Image (spheres, rainbow, N blue to C red):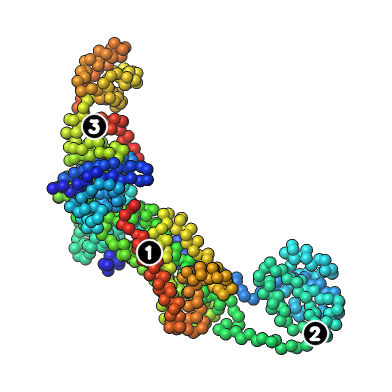
Amino acid sequence: MGARRLWAIMLKELRQLRRDRLTFGMIVGIPALQLLLFGYAISLEVKQLDAALLDQAHSAQSRQAAEMVAHSQVLNFVRVIDSPAEVEPLLRRGEVSAVVVIPRDFERRMQSGQPALQIVVDGADPAVQAAARQLAALPLPGAREVAPAIEVVNFYNPERRAAVATVPGLIGVILTMTMILFTAIAIVRERERGNLEMVMTTPIRPMEFLLGKLSPYLVIGLIQVSLVLLLGVLVFGVPIRGALPHVYLASLLFILANLALGILISTVARTQFQAMQMTMFLLLPSILLSGFAFPFAGMPRPAQWLAEALPLTHFVRISRSLILRAADLGDMASELAVLGVMALVFLLLALSRFHKRLD
Amino acid sequence: MNAIVARGMSRRFGEVLAVDGVDLDVPEGIIYGFLGPNGSGKSTSIRMLCGLLTPSEGDIRVLGFDIPREAEALRRRLGYMTQKFSLYEDLTVTENLDFLAAVHGLYGRAWHRRREELLSRFDLGDIHRQLAGTLSGGQKQRLALAGGVLHEPSLLVLDEPTSAVDPQSRRDFWDTLFELCAAGTTILVSTHYMDEAERCHRLAILDRGRLVADGVPADLCDAVPHTVLRVAGQELQAVRAWLALQPGIASVTQIGDSLRVLAAPDTKPRNVEQAARAAGHAITATVTAANLEDVFVSTTRRPVVANGS
């Protein structure tokens, strides 16, 4: 392993990167865009769903109840209807996501403690179901106060802010997206452009070549981590409760695992297009199965096994613990060990596949 | 002492036998040419000799190293210039050279001196800060050659180095090759240009993966087993059609306002003229010396597809 040769490859890689405007833009553009998209557009709370009102009681109390529902801002009444027959067509055409039905015997039901108000929701949309659960907890005027049997205490994110829960995992998603892609293309591009044939006839060692190509991206990955954390703190007020050096060290290990995976793809793919396809093939299950988007525990067993094989699954756990739960590296030792083993295995596999030959 | 020795070198790609049992002996210190049309197995042979492709069969020794087993040791003493420009187009001339130098273990003051020497020798001084991708064909070729010889290799292998450059650049390039050769470098160069083949000290002709001729260009020309005739006259197309049907005629091709004919060794020009007159064609035939194109046609039994891409 020659330090000078390694440095020469890194320097060459950095110089090429500096002149590659698109890649350079991706380094900063992807994290910023993703963070703002996830932070602003995706929200755990649902507000202002279009709804219809069917008031069959026509009493002062029923009007008061309808007003309370409107005040909650979860629903926005856009239609008032007179007949139960109109409910289903409205939902079917997607004109409203919910219909509030107040029955004729509203007052009597209220007094007897029976369910008095019915909200018909569009179950085809998971977000609407969440809204219905919120509404179900709404106290109605005149109803007897009943203390809920179960009280939920929200640790780490008491205001239930979406950005707080999203940012730690999002660091992992962004790194998966960019790091794998950068290195997946790295070697294939040299093969396509014919550079590799020339490089192969020099005394370069495969390990030097792979590490030299990979190293600059370690730094770039850390820049991306900093960018997401900075925007997360400044724009969305995400608290960083754990020690920052621990967050960076864990990120570095995760970046290495992804870069090694990208290099492995690069030794398998024959064209840049193939490399990109393989990256996408990995990215989708990473986002869906890692626990970033959907709860890990809710998935069927085979999906969980698959998820355990993806670096992102482990990083989402690590990152949420370090950033939100003030855990330290020691708490996450086993997850970190898995990432370390993955990085090593990917790198060794890539090395075994990379020959200084064309056949 | 031979720089390259190959015995029964073969390479199969699936069903296709790209190189078929080639025996080579390339002496040290000469320019050795590889002549052949596209697809004749030149590039495949060169890649096997450089240790880039594993031969399906055969033994190869280059600079005494057993190839491909000792390819890594060979790489320190080998300069290789690929057919397609293979330096980094998004690096400058200097950055490309610096990269290759570091890879070959050249650095510091010694390298800076060597770099100045290379920039001036290959006339790259004025463009040393230009991106390689923006260079002309001739400039790219000079840069690639500079990159191939910066570590002063004992053996320089060039795969169709002049396919993308103008005639003046080709002349200059060959002058440089002879300078390198005079300094002791063995050079293996592939080409499909006859005029370039003529410049080589020794020459191997490849056709469909087989070695069909091997020797000094002049000897190869002398050994052509035909009488070469230059035929002038009226209505050359009709003469050509008639000649092609005559016994003992191996090949007829038109060059300018005359025909070049490979005839049986004992053919007398006067006899050809008389036979033509009897057939109603007025021609004059003169014997002329065989050139490399005639060598190529007579060894491969098919016309040259030169100056192609």
**Callout 1: SS:** helix
Instruction: Provide the residue designation for mark 1.
Output: A349
Query: What is the spatial separation of the Cα atoms under label 2 and label 1, in whole angstroms?
Result: 66 Å
Name the foreground residue: A319 vs A78.
A319
Q: Where is residue B14 in the image (x, y as percent from the top left)?
A: 37, 45
Answer yes or no: is residue A59 visible: yes
In which quadrant is the N terminus of chain A drawn? bottom left
Q: Where is residue A41 in the image (x, y as percent from the top left)?
A: 60, 70
Amino acid at pointer 1: Leu
Name the foreground residue: A236 vs A203.
A203
Instruction: Provide the residue designation for mark 2.
Output: A113
User: Is A68 drawn above or below residue B69 in the view shown?
Assistant: below
User: Mark 3 or mark 1: which is in front?
Assistant: 1
**Callout 2: SS:** loop
Instruction: Provide the residue designation for mark 3.
Output: B295
Query: What is the spatial separation of the Cα atoms under label 3 and label 2, in whole angstroms?
Result: 109 Å
Q: Position of residue A94 (x, y in %)?
A: 72, 64
B76 lies left or right of A316: left
Name the foreground residue: A34 vs B293.
B293
User: Is A158 drawn above or below residue B222 in the view shown?
Assistant: below
Write the residue at 48% across / 81% down.
A322
Chain letter of the residue beneath label 1 in the structure image: A
Amino acid at pointer 2: Gly
Query: What is the spatial separation of the Cα atoms under label 3 and label 1, in whole angstroms?
Result: 51 Å
A256 lies left or right of B96: right
Write the residue at 22% across / 36% down.
B213
Name the foreground residue: A27 vs B11.
B11
